[in-house]
């Protein structure tokens, strides 16, 4: 999908006009101010598409995140735009075909966030399996009566099957960590990985096959329209009774009603969720459940990672300006 044509971008002025839709880390913002004639959404509120278009109308470069939706009508409202740089690896919020058709380059931030996201995936997994929310609540409440042999018993990890749905860069970083916890790694991907990447993980040609084999399901597949609601009631029923589900990808891959029903009935023991359909409006059913550990989409939220993501976008834009092909270009 990558266009060979970088000439449009090369013709930009020394300091292209750019609009920053969300506040980036101070180091990255300082670097952007040096390189661009930069206007900033100072209060960092999420911008609806019409407002983003109004503010960025003259921008040649637009910095967005997964909270900004860039569909064809918004792109059409930005006639000066030559490049979009999204501070995310996911790009389901951008219509790449429309961008390509309009000659707009799109850059994202793969690789540099894989370790941070994998760390949060393990945090969710551990908290779901070992009842982190209930333990924290018990200590904070002052109601804890002391150690007890049957208190807050969770699920052990040794020898259990971790089924990773989506064995890309983040999925593989999760697998690496999971092996250290004694988990057996299985995965489902569109295609089988080479042995050096699979590192002994067992491949399932179908998602249903992976679900039937998993004690813990890790959702790490990229967000995409074709995957919306893929984990519906029928698929969740394929998991072993008492299984655990973790989602580090995009909320809309999971049918919320079905997951909440499975958590209520005991079909699933617990879940750990960092992402939600319609963020930040989280389905209220999750808030009522003690067996769900929730975090507010913080997979890549470390200082080091957010700096690295910003620098990757800057490097990519500099490559475009030099007539080189950035490694992080989507189209
Ligand atoms: C990503 O990089 O896609 C994260 O989910 C943040 O949006």
Image (cartoon, grey):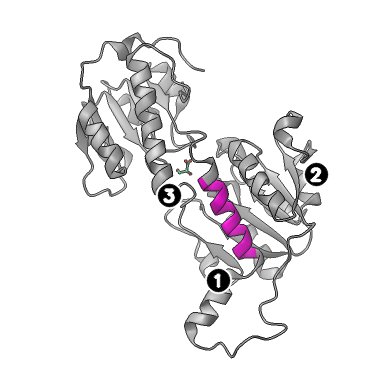
Between 93 and 296, the one lying in front of the other is: 296
Counting residues from the start of the chain, the first of labels 2 and 1 encountered is: 1
Q: Which residue is mark 1?
A: 133
Mark 3 touches mark 2? (CB < 8 Å): no
Give the percent coordinates (x, y) of residue 160: 78, 57
Q: Judging from the image, what secondary structure is the residue with disc 3 in?
A: loop
* 3D distance between C-alphas at marks 2 and 1: 31 Å
- Tell me the residue at 44%/52% (across/down): 279
Tag shown at residue 69: none
Assign the magenta stretch its main secondary structure. helix
Q: Specify the segment rendered in magenta.
A: 116-128
From the viewer's perspective, tell me whether residue 185 is left or right of residue 116: right
Q: Judging from the image, what secondary structure is the residue with disc 2 in?
A: helix
Between 304 and 214, the one lying in front of the other is: 304
Counting residues from the start of the chain, the first of labels 1 and 3 encountered is: 1
Nearer the observer: mark 2 or 1; the answer is 1
Give the percent coordinates (x, y) of residue 103: 38, 16
Q: Residue furthest bottom?
A: 145
Mark 1 touches mark 3? (CB < 8 Å): no
- Tell me the residue at 67%/45% (across/down): 175
Give the percent coordinates (x, y) of residue 135: 57, 76
Tag shown at residue 302: 3
From the viewer's perspective, tell me whether residue 306 is left or right of residue 32: right
Tag shown at residue 209: 2
Q: Is residue 327 above or below residue 156?
A: above
- Tell me the residue at 56%/64% (across/down): 293
The answer, for residue 108, to whether it is visible in the render is yes
**Crowding at mark 3 (Cα within 10 Å: few <14, some 14-19, many 20+):** few
């Amino acid at each position: 999908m990558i266009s060979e044509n970088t000439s449009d971008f090369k013709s930009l002025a020394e300091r292209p006009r750019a609009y920053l839709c969300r506040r980036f880390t101070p180091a990255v913002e300082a670097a952007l101010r040096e390189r661009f004639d930069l206007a900033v959404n100072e209060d960092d509120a999420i911008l609806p598409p019409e407002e983003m278009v109004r503010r960025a109308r003259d921008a040649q470069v637009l910095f967005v995140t997964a909270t900004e939706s860039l569909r064809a009508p918004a792109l059409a409202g930005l006639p000066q735009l030559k490049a979009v740089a999204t501070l995310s690896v996911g790009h389901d919020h951008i219509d790449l075909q429309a961008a390509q058709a309009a000659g707009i380059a799109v850059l994202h931030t793969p690789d540099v966030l894989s370790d941070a996201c994998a760390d949060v995936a393990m945090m969710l997994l551990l908290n779901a399996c070992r009842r982190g929310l209930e333990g924290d609540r018990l200590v904070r409440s002052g109601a804890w009566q002391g150690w007890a042999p049957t208190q807050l018993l969770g699920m052990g990890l040794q020898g259990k099957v971790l089924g990773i749905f989506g064995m890309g860069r983040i999925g593989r970083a999760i697998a690496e960590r999971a092996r250290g916890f004694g988990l057996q790694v299985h995965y489902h991907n569109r295609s089988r990985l080479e042995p050096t990447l699979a590192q002994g993980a067992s491949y399932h040609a179908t998602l249903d096959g992976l679900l039937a084999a998993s004690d813990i399901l890790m959702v790490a597949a990229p967000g995409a329209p074709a995957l919306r609601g893929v984990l519906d009631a029928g698929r969740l029923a394929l998991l072993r009774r008492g299984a655990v589900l973790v989602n580090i990808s995009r909320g809309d891959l999971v049918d919320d009603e079905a997951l909440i029903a499975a958590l209520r009935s005991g079909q699933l023991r617990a879940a750990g969720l960092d992402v939600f359909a319609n963020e930040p409006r989280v389905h209220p059913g999750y808030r009522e459940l003690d067996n769900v550990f929730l975090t507010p989409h913080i997979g890549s939220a470390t200082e080091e990672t957010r700096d690295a993501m910003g620098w990757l976008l800057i490097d990519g834009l500099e490559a475009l300006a030099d007539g080189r092909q950035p490694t992080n270009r989507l189209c």
